Image (tube, helix red, strand yellow):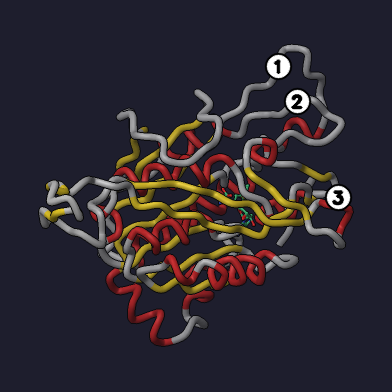
């Protein structure tokens, strides 16, 4: 279902100027292409482990900690209609990915489910870190799911766990949709530990539907420990005049130089949660990916 006001305006992720992007030579006037996201995590030299060796001259070779390098290639667009923003990578995805890398193993225990996974970048990071099973979900619109699957496939050599890409629309009853998923997946969800989501707050109706989905998942799966939701809250500049698009979306809409925050609305819904605690993660966590970490980036944790 497309929420009210979601017309044909096109949007561009602010991240698009910050990442390494190679446009396709042929298709779509250069709006589609491939981006590379590099990151490294501290680790031991895999070939030598902890052993002390000797070089040809008899000098000792001490084990050195060498960062493990990753390069994730993601197919994406740099401009899409609002209904297909999931075909682009948004900054929240990298902020959430940084958090996953910084928490490492602790977050990769059990099954992890991503809502609004878009290109699948954050799910790929989780599975590269060792999450056993990741269910990357999004609404089945345009080529979002297809592109996400292709991105998972394209990075399969990095993955230590499995990723499944499935449709899950926040505006429809969660249980009904999950009942149509493969039996094997439904069984794995009995050990669902974490929900993750990035940049999913940009329209009040969708935010309500999103929060409804999060709470429904918490009640369906007692195994869930926490949901981590990374958002970028944007401010409305004082010169902004009223426009339905400005008042609805937090993205930079082409030819309109301003955006409107739906963040406060999200906070008001979070404050009304029953039986769940919500807090902002205030701890600084290390930046592993290359992007501009704006002060508007925020990470919420929802737990029992
Ligand atoms: C701004 S994009 C963020 C994508 C990705 N998480 C990232 O940060 O790069 C918002 C995501 O929410 C998804 N979305 C929008 N409406 C949805 C719905 N009704 N059900 C499920 N996902 C939805 C979009 O398809 C898109 O993937």
Q: Which residue is mark 1?
A: 237
Seen at 61% across and 34% down, the residue is 262
* 223 horizontally vs 83: left or right: left
Between the residue at mark 3 and the residue at mark 2, the CA separation in whole angstroms equals 17 Å
- Looking at marks 3 and 2 on the same chain, the residue that comes earlier in the sequence is marked by 3
Residue most extreme to the front: 57
- Taking the view exactly as shown, the residue that stands out farthest to the bottom is 183
Give the left or right position of residue 109, taking residue 168 as reference.
Answer: left
Q: CA distance from mark 1 to mark 2?
A: 7 Å
Q: Which mark is residue 8?
A: 3
Residues 79 and 139: in front is: 79
Q: Please give the label number shown on residue 170.
A: none
Circle 1: is it few (<14), some (14-19), or many (20+) Cα within 10 Å?
A: few
- Nearest to the observer: residue 38 or residue 275: 38
Q: Position of residue 165 (x, y in %)?
A: 53, 71
Please, is residue 201 above or below residue 213 in the view?
Answer: above
**Image-quadrant location for residue 201:** top right
Pointer 2 residue: 258
Residue 50 position within the rendered picture, expressed as x and y whole percent measured from the top left: 13, 55
Label 2 near label 1: C-beta < 8 Å?
A: yes
Going 74% across and 54% down the picture, which residue do you hit?
Answer: 83
């Amino acid at each position: 279902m497309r929420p009210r006001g979601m017309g044909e305006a096109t949007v561009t992720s602010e991240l698009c100027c910050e990442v390494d992007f190679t446009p396709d030579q042929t298709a779509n006037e250069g709006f589609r292409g491939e981006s590379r996201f590099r990151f490294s995590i501290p680790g031991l030299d895999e070939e030598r482990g902890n052993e002390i060796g000797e070089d040809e001259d008899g000098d000792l070779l001490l084990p050195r900690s060498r960062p493990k390098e990753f390069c994730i290639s993601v197919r994406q667009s740099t401009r899409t209609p609002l209904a297909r923003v999931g075909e682009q990578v948004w900054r929240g995805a990298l902020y959430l990915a940084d958090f996953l890398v910084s928490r490492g193993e602790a977050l990769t225990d059990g099954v992890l489910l991503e809502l609004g996974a878009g290109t699948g970048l954050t799910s790929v990071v989780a599975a590269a870190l060792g999450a056993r099973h990741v269910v990357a979900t999004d609404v089945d619109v345009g080529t979002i799911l297809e592109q996400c699957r292709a991105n998972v496939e394209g990075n399969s050599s990095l993955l230590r766990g499995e990723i499944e890409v499935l449709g899950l629309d926040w505006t429809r009853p969660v249980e009904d949709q999950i009942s149509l998923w493969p039996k094997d997946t439904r069984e794995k969800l009995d050990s669902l530990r974490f929900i993750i989501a990035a940049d999913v707050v940009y329209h009040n109706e969708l935010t309500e539907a999103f929060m409804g989905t999060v709470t429904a998942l918490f009640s369906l799966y007692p195994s869930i420990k926490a949901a981590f939701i990374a958002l970028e809250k944007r401010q409305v500049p004082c010169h902004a005049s009223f426009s339905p698009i400005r008042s609805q979306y937090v993205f930079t809409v082409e030819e309109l130089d301003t955006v409107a925050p739906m963040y406060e609305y999200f906070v008001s819904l979070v404050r009304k949660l029953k039986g769940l605690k919500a807090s902002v993660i205030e701890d600084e966590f290390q930046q592993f990916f290359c992007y501009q970490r704006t002060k508007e980036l925020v990470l919420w944790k929802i737990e029992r």
